[in-house]
Image (cartoon, rainbow, N blue to C red):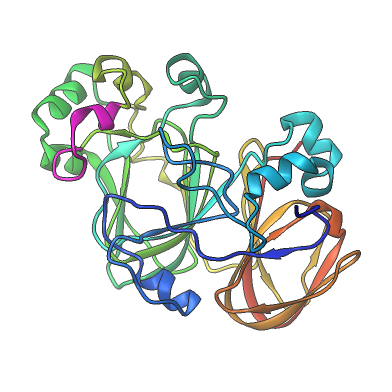
């Protein structure tokens, strides 16, 4: 079993999803595209909701990453992280390529998830836009305050037009980042390719489920909409979108949400502290020089799980990458 001493190059991990996409993931990795392969769950110790194994990352030696981390948590995660979170990466990273508009949905907070879904984590998330067709749009947060009865009525009637119109449309371009706190309703538009960081669950309350999901139960995850809609942030966001959307491109820190996750854009010359991290190589070639695990070649399309035990490192070469990290411990 992998002992968590050396960075591990990861194969693609594309569990079945209900929407189309994935061409950009295939192009990045040099793979054949799948019609319904819009998400690559990178270094995942998280399963699809209600599933036993779908979503989990299998390492090249056949071991589940989840099991490898459990067998050597200090090596993989560092002692401070283990004290705070146990043998749990506390992070899920995805490559997400939307081949169609996603439905209007939101995610529960930690408190709501604990009370109603028996989960330690809710699902705050963030998107780093790494590719976008011209005019690409996300819809995020209600533009103005909405009362509970109005939202419940939209959901009961499955009024997609009303739900989408109530959200703030935001044009995005490569390099932008979007922070999505738990509860904030949102929909990603077609033609957008993102690196997504999120808390490690698959909990989504799908307000606009008709035409996307097989049944209503999958939309509220079995607790009924009367309860599930209690997780929706109904506040207006039109005048504070700058809290959510940040324009790029940039190097260095892209996301610094210490309670949830962190991300940096790396180029040659970057110096990195010791940390568990998920590395996504977006372009070029280079080398990750690690303090304790030697030199690791980097190439466009590579994804790595980098253990804390590899030590400090530097990046060399004409390469562009994103390092994703768990919350601060």
Residue 238: image x %, image y %? Answer: 33, 41
Task: Please say whether residue 163 is one of the residues in the magenta stretch.
Answer: no
Compared with 225, 260 (above or below) is below
Residue at x 37% of width, y 23% of height: 231
Q: Is residue 275 left or right of residue 318?
A: right
Numbered-mark total = 0
Residue 88: image x %, image y %? Answer: 68, 37
Residue at x 55% of width, y 39% of height: 199
Looking at the rendered image, the quarter that the C terminus falls into is: top right
Residue at x 30% of width, y 64% of height: 136
Residue 299: image x %, image y %? Answer: 63, 80
Q: Is residue 66 left or right of residue 143?
A: right
Q: Between residue 223 and residue 143, name the one nearer to us.
A: 223
Q: Is residue 254 left or right of residue 16?
A: right
Q: Between residue 70 and residue 175, name the one nearer to us.
A: 70
Q: In which quadrant of the rendered view does residue 267 lie?
A: bottom right
Q: What stretch of residues is rendered in magenta?
A: 209-220
Compared with 265, 295 (above or below) is below
Residue at x 40% of width, y 67% of height: 173
Residue 134: image x %, image y %? Answer: 29, 73
Q: In which quadrant of the rendered view does residue 234 lie?
A: top left
Q: Between residue 260 and residue 134, name the one nearer to us.
A: 260
Compared with 97, 108 (above or below) is above
């Amino acid at each position: 079993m992998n002992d968590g001493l050396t960075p591990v190059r990861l194969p693609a991990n594309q569990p079945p999803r209900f929407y189309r996409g994935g061409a950009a993931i295939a192009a990045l990795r040099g793979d054949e595209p799948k019609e319904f392969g819009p998400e690559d769950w990178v270094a995942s110790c998280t399963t699809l909701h209600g599933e036993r194994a779908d979503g989990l990352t299998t390492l090249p030696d056949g071991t589940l990453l989840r099991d490898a981390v459990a067998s050597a948590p200090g090596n993989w995660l560092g002692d401070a992280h283990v004290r705070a979170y146990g043998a749990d990466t506390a992070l899920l990273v995805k490559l997400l390529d939307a081949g169609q508009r996603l439905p209007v949905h939101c995610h529960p907070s930690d408190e709501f998830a604990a009370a109603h879904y028996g989960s330690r984590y809710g699902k705050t998330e963030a998107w780093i836009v790494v590719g976008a067709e011209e005019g690409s749009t996300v819809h995020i947060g209600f533009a103005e305050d909405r009362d509970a009865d109005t939202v419940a009525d939209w959901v009961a009637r499955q009024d997609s037009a009303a739900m989408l119109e109530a959200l703030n449309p935001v044009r995005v371009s490569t390099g932008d980042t979007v922070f999505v706190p738990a509860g904030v309703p949102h929909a990603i538009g077609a033609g957008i390719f993102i690196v997504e960081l999120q808390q490690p669950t698959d909990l989504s309350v799908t307000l606009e489920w008709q035409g996307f999901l097989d049944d209503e139960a999958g939309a509220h995850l079995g607790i009924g909409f009367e309860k599930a809609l209690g997780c929706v942030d109904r506040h207006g966001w039109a005048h504070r979108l700058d809290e959510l959307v940040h324009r790029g491109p940039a190097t260095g820190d892209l996301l610094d949400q210490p309670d949830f996750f962190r991300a940096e854009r790396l180029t040659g010359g970057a110096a990195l502290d010791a940390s568990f991290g998920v590395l996504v190589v977006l372009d070029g070639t280079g080398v990750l020089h690690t303090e304790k695990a030697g030199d690791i070649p980097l190439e466009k399309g590579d994804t790595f799980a980098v253990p804390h035990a590899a030590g400090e490192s530097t990046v060399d070469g004409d390469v562009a990458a994103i390092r994703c990290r768990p919350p601060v411990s």
